[in-house]
Image (cartoon, rainbow, N blue to C red):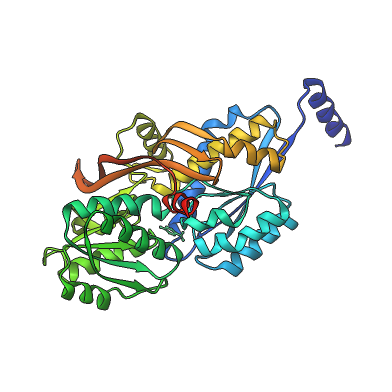
Amino acid sequence: MKRIAALAVASLMATGAAAQTVKIGVVNTFTGPQAMFGDMTDRAFKLYQKLHDKELPSGVKLEFVTRDDGGPNPDKARQLAQELVVRDRVQILAGVAFTPNAMAMAPLATEAKIPLILTNAGTSVVTTRSPYIVRFSFTLWQSCVPLGEWAAKKFKRAYTLVADYAPGQDAEVAFAQGFKAGGGELVGSVRVPLQNPDFAPYMQRVKDAKPDALMVFVPAGKTSTSVMKTFADLGLAAAGIKLIGPGDITTDEELANMGDVALGVTTVFHYSAAAERPANRRFVEAWKKEYGANATPNFAAVAAWDAMAAIFHVVKEQNGKIDSERTMELLKGYRNADSPRGPIAIDPETRDIVQNEYLREVRRVNGQLANVELETVATAVKDPWKEMQKKK
Ligand code: PHB
């Protein structure tokens, strides 16, 4: 045995390759109503690695240590991140579906000086909580301001219904700002519990107020389907109320479960699996080849895909020897002209994603429901909330 090991070391030295493992700790949601986030992220990470593994410098390997936070659960997320840093000695943290979890992990990233690469958590303020946070997902402000501006051209009176936590509040305020600036009138707004809400009483209240449109934000996944069904069951669509929102409410992988009630729902978002861009066509094709013809990647998958491309970039640039400060420098200057969602960049000042926002409508395409992109409503959007803070 000893001789074999010695030989292996000798041959490694002879080729000049040093075995170098980069340890990445992932905290995400793999159980509960939003388990989709963990699955999508994990699949995207694995697929990217499978297709790009050869690009890593010789002898360099990525090792993932993955943990389930079970949903919006800040104490659990903090504890898991702490263990990943202290016990498992990860060099990079990644993932995080829920804003409260990302907020809880931020001080740890700062203290330990470990880059935290977000693949979801969309409340604007999150990236300000640690200089080691970089976001590859989106902010609710990015989609909801252009959504409000577009809605003001179409509708006179709107109502908002959001999950009662930070990203819901962002969605509500950002939409109101865009809608009012465009001359629209907000006739009501309601916040519903984050966990297991019964939407019926809230939807009834909305119906009674007779708005032209209802803007909804809830965390994407099974909850979106439940919103869609209640909206139809209580007759809001039949009463002529139009359902609109950020793309979380028509998340690509749930469209088949939502069924025809989703037809015509209009959203603004940065990613649709139905987008015609060649980079997206290739991405969706690779996904279906790997995970089956009925599998559809969504915005969480594309965030993780792009984040993994950025991780590959920092690993290659440093030859597998990860230095936190250099990693942050590289991430701050990161750009990709050809992401499945279109061109993306990290704003070096805020460490937040810069991307396009598309107006989409759920339509039937080749027998299946899809978020069809109608137009690019905003190009290279920086988080509007941070732009506003700068002016204050
Ligand atoms: C968040 O907690 O930041 C969050 C969760 C689910 C979403 C969007 C944002 O669909």
- Quadrant hosting residue 58: top right
Residue under the point 70% across and 34% down? 320
The reply to whether residue 51 is visible in this rendering is: yes
Q: Is residue 17 above or below residue 314?
A: above
Left or right for 21, reference 1: left
Residue under the point 62% across and 54% down? 130
Q: x, y percentage for residue 260?
A: 18, 56
Left or right for 259, reference 387: left
Residue under the point 68% across and 50% down? 114
Quadrant containing the N terminus is: top right
Q: x, y percentage for residue 108?
A: 67, 59
The reply to whether residue 370 is visible in this rendering is: no
Residue under the point 59% across and 33% down? 313
Q: x, y percentage for residue 23?
A: 68, 45
Q: Nearer the viewer, residue 2 or 343?
A: 343
Left or right for 24, reference 286: right
Q: x, y percentage for residue 24?
A: 64, 47
Q: Which of 335 and 4 is in front in this view?
A: 335
- Quadrant hosting residue 278: top left
Which residue of the protein is positioned furthest toward the front in this rendering?
A: 392
**Quarter of the displayed picture in which ligand 1 can be seen:** bottom left
